Amino acid sequence: MADAAERPLLRVEAAVKEYGERVKTVALAGVDLSLDAGEFAALVGPSGSGKSTLLNLVGLLDRPTSGRIWLGDTETTALDEAGLTAVRARMLGFVFQFHHLLPAFTAVENVMLPEWGDTGFASKALRRRAEELLHAVGLADRMSYRTTDLSGGQQQRVAVARALVRRPPLVLADEPTGNLDTESSHEVLELMRRFNRELGTTFLVVTHDPRIADACDRVVELVDGRVESDHRAAPR
Amino acid sequence: MPFAWFVALRYLRDAKGQTALILAAVSVGVSVIVFLSALINGLQASLIDKTLGSQPHVTVRVPREAPRALVEPTAETAIARNVQATSQRLRSIDQWPLVMADLERVAGVTAVAPLVTGAGFARRGDAKLPIAVRGIDAERFLSILDVRRSIVAGRYDVAGGNVLVASTLATDLGVAPGDKLRMTTSEGVDDTVTVAGVFTLGNEAVDSTWVLTSLRHAQSLYALPGGATSLELKVADVFDAERVAQTAHDRSGLDAQSWMKRNAELLAGLSAQSGSKAVIQFFVVVAVALGIASVLIVSVVQKSREIGILRAVGTAPRRVLAVFLIQGGVLGLLGSIVGSAFGALLSKLFESMARDPNGAPKFPIELDLSLFAATAALATGVGLLAAVIPARRAARLDPAKAIRNG
C-alpha cells in the first residue's frame, strides 16, 4: 500500500460498451480516463456521446463489454453482483437528477438511505450525521418533509447530502442541475465545490451546461464514444 | 427498526387504498375459513356427541354360533350336503371377569362394564310393549353412558327389584317413579319390578325400549347365573375406537364392534363433509394468495425506479427481497387477525339466530384458539409464499435499467 497515494482514485482502461445483439450500437469505443483524489471534473459532450454510459460503468451500475475499471485498489470487472454492491457502498456516492429521491421517505431518511440500506440498521450516529449534512446544505428546517413537498433546488441539495453521507471518496453526479433554474443550479454547484474543498471528496459531474463545466477544474469531452479533449483549467 | 421492515411498512402505509383493498380481500377469505371450520367442526362434534350419547364406544360379545360340517369335500370326492344355519341363543362370555380385567389394560380404554342384555315384554294394564332389558353394574355402567345425568324423573337406582325405564316407554306404559311393572323375558321368566326413575338419552330407538335393571336381576331373568352377555368399553379418543375394537378382538377372540362400524354411514357423511370443507378452504386460500401476489407485482412495477435507486445507493438485493416478502407476510397476518375476528363474530351471530325452541343452538359453533392460531399461521405463510415471485423480481431488477426506464 506504499504507493496508494500515487495511485489514481479512478482508472478506466480501454472501456468499450456495446448495446444490442444483432445490430451493435457502440456507446463507448475505448475510453481511457483516470481521476486523482480531490479532483473536481466535468464530463461533457453532445447527446449520445456516451457520457451517461461511462458514468454507469464507473458507478458499477453496468458492466463494460471489454476494458477494465479500477476504483482505488479494486479491479471491478471481475466482481459479482454482491461484490459490486459492496464496492458501490464503500467508494461511491450518487447525485442523480432530482427526481431520483425516494418519495416515500422524508428528507432525512433519504440522506440516511445509503448506509441504512447497506447495513440494515439506522444508528443514532447515522441519523446525527444525516441531520448535520442537511444543516450544511441549508435544509435544517426541512428534515422531516417528504421530498415531494420540497422545491427542485431543495431536492437536489438533499441528493447531494445523500451522496455524501458515507463520506465516499468519489461522488458521481449525472446532470445534477439539469432540471434547475439558474439560481438553484448555482447553489447546488457551490455546495459540491464546498464539499470538494472541505472534505476532499472527488467529483465527476456529467453536464450539458457550459457554465457548470467552466466552474470545474478539469473538463473531459466525449464525442462518439471517445475522449475528444481533456484539459485542466488554470489554478484559481 | 430494521431497514427492510421500515421500507415495507412505509410502502404499505403510503399505498393506503391498495393496502386496504387487499386487506379486505384477505380478511373476507380468512373469515370464510374460520366460519366454515367453526360451523362444520361444531356440527360434527355435536353429531358425534349425540350418537355416542346412547351407545358405547365398543361392544364385546360372544361370536355367533356357526354350524360345522363333519366331513369336508376333498379333491377326489364330492359331497352332497345341506348345512343348516344355527339359531342363536343367549350365551355368557366365558370367564368374563378375567376378560374384563384384561381389556382394562388395553391402551386407550378408560372403562369397561359387564352387561346382560335380552329381549322381553313389559305389561301394565292393557299395554304390552316389547322391551330391551339391560342388566348393568350400577357403578361401572355410569362411565360408559352417564344415565344418572339423563334421569328426568325419580332417581338412579337399580338395586333390589328397582328398574329405570326409558322416557318414551314410560309414557307408553303410563308409569312414573314408584309404580309397579310386570316384565316377561324371552326366556319366559315373569317378574314384577318397581320403577325407580325415568331417563332419556335422545335416541328414539333407545328411549322407547330400554329398561335398565341390575346385572344380578338380569342374570336371573335370563337364566345366566353369574354370566355377562357383553362387555361395553369406553375409549379415550372416540376415533380410536376401531383400533381398540381390533385389539380387543385379537386379545379375547370375542366379537368386538366399534361405534364407527355401527355408524359407518354417519362417518362416511362426516368425512365427505370434511372433504368438501377442505376443497372450499383450498380455493379460498388460492384466491387469497393470488390477490396478495397480484397487488405486490403491481407494486414492484410501480416502484421499479425507486427499487433501482435503492440498489444504486448500496442496498443489497436480499434486502430488497425482504422488503416485499415482509409486505406479503404482514398483509397475510393483518388480514388473518381482522378476518378471524370477523369470522368469529359471524359464527356467533349465526349461532344466536338459529336456535331450537328450547333455546339450544341448532348449529353449535366450535371456536377455539388453535383454529385462530392455525389460520393466522396459514395466512402469514400464504402471504410470504405469494410474495416470493414479486420479491424475486424486485431483487433482480437491474438498477441502471430501472433508473433509466423508470
Image (cartoon, coloured by chain):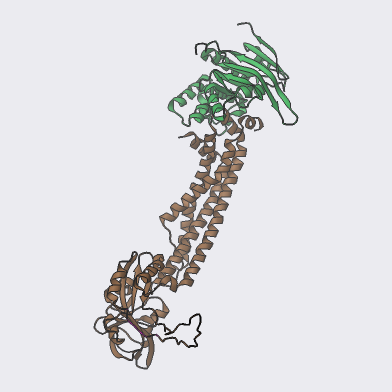
User: Is B78 drawn above or below residue A67 in the view shown?
Assistant: below
Position of residue A230 measured from the top left corner of the image (x, y, whole percent): 67, 11
The answer to whether residue B274 is left or right of residue B191 is: right
Give the magenta-colored segment's residue range.
B88-93
Closest to the observer, B35 or A153: B35
User: Is B311 drawn above or below residue A204 in the view shown?
Assistant: below
Residue at 54% in and 24% down: A87
- Chain A color in figure: green
Position of residue B222 measured from the top left corner of the image (x, y, whole percent): 31, 86
Position of residue B12 measured from the top left corner of the image (x, y, whole percent): 53, 41
Task: In the displayed orientation, state which residue is furthest to the bottom.
Answer: B126
Asked if residue A32 is among those painted magenta in the image, a careful observer would answer no
Task: Pick the quarter of the image with the N terminus of chain B.
Answer: top left
- Tell which chain the image draws in brown: B
Residue at 64% in and 31% down: B401
User: Is B124 drawn above or below residue B2 in the view shown?
Assistant: below
Magenta part, dominant SS: loop
Residue at 24% in and 83% down: B160
Task: Pick the quarter of the image with the C terminus of chain B.
Answer: top right
User: How many numbered marks does the figure carry?
Assistant: 0
The answer to whether residue B215 is left or right of residue A102 is: left
Occupied quadrant, residue B320: top right
Closest to the observer, B114 or A226: B114
Occupied quadrant, residue B403: top right
Asked if residue B90 is among those painted magenta in the image, a careful observer would answer yes
